[in-house]
Amino acid sequence: MPGAPHPVLERYYAGEAERQRFVVALFDGAARHYDEVCRLMSLGSGQWYRRRALERAGLRPGMRLLDVATGTGLVARSAARILGDARAVVGLDPSGGMLREARKRLAAPLVQGRGEHLPFASERFDLVTLGYALRHVADLEVAFRECFRVLRPGGRLLVLEISSAPSAARRGALRLYLTQVLPLVMALRTRNRHARMLTRYYWDTIAACVPPAAILDALREAGFADPARHVVAGTFSEYLATRPGQRSDMAAGEMPRSP
Ligand SMILES: C[S@@+](CC[C@H](N)C(=O)[O-])C[C@H]1O[C@@H](n2cnc3c(N)ncnc32)[C@H](O)[C@@H]1O
């Protein structure tokens, strides 16, 4: 499918039409253990890193943020801390299980939906984030266009992603950790098959993902100006892209359209 972030992975689902159902079921099933998977995956640095990335993207009090693919709210929670107000953040995710976990720790409005069809009026947000979910959307350009639409002119999109490491040794180490070590640790700690499968699926989608240049091209095609990629520790990619134009003022306290 043109614009898909990676080809169909037949080991997990039969065709493009089944991909979203598979992904949502996977996250629904792993939701209770997701934060622990993340902690182990990032060796405990995940929240610190998300906060630094948001600061690098220019997030500051007074702004309004949409966190697409919010999951259990890890990016949204960091954003709410920076903004000093959880109501300045809106989280969106298709997985009811992930949203239920998010609700336990986050007072922000949460909406069930997909990045490819955002249920919000145009030009509502100063920053849109897409954290570790680019590999799960059906079409990159469609999702990026939606992010563009809901950003105010001058607003920014921050995409966080894990990329396959450029050196063979690092790639091998990442693969071993995600496909062998973490599934074993998760099996011992949770006995949850979705949590075990999540890290394997993670690696398979990372390995099959289109290269960073294609992601930058899709951002340009969606209308963003000068998208750039900043790489941390060889594998953590931050894509930052700006919607061109000047802010035409928004009414204070506007809320997203209901789905
Ligand atoms: C790896 S989690 C990332 C959660 C969070 N952003 C973080 O930083 O930890 C990926 C999330 O993407 C969501 N997702 C899957 N397909 C999606 C889509 N089409 N649009 C938006 N989110 C999607 C999943 O339900 C899951 O919660």
Image (cartoon, rainbow, N blue to C red):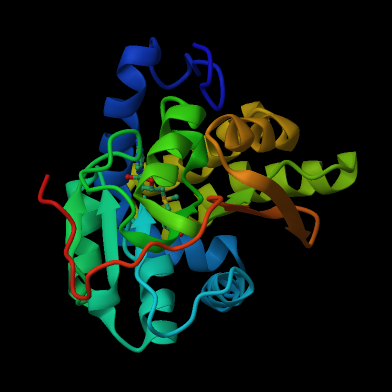
Q: Is residue 151 above or below residue 133?
A: below
Image coords of residue 238 (percent x, y):
65, 56
Q: Is residue 253 above or below residue 94?
A: below
Q: Nearer the viewer, residue 65 or 165?
A: 65
Q: Nearer the viewer, residue 88 or 231?
A: 88
Q: Is residue 200 above or below residue 140?
A: below
For the C terminus, the image quarter is top left
- Quadrant in the rendering for residue 179: top right
Image coords of residue 141 (percent x, y):
50, 29
Image coords of residue 120 (percent x, y):
22, 48
Residue at 74% across / 57% down in the picture? 230
Left/right placement of residue 25 relative to residue 68 reads left
Residue at 54% across / 76% down in the picture? 51
Q: Nearer the viewer, residue 26 or 249?
A: 249
Q: Nearer the viewer, residue 4 or 18?
A: 4
Residue at 44% across / 39% down in the picture? 197
Q: Is residue 144 above or below residue 127?
A: above
Left/right placement of residue 227 relative to residue 150 reads right
Left/right placement of residue 5 relative to residue 23 reads right
Residue at 52% across / 33% down in the picture? 222
The single residue placed furthest to the bottom in the displayed view is 84
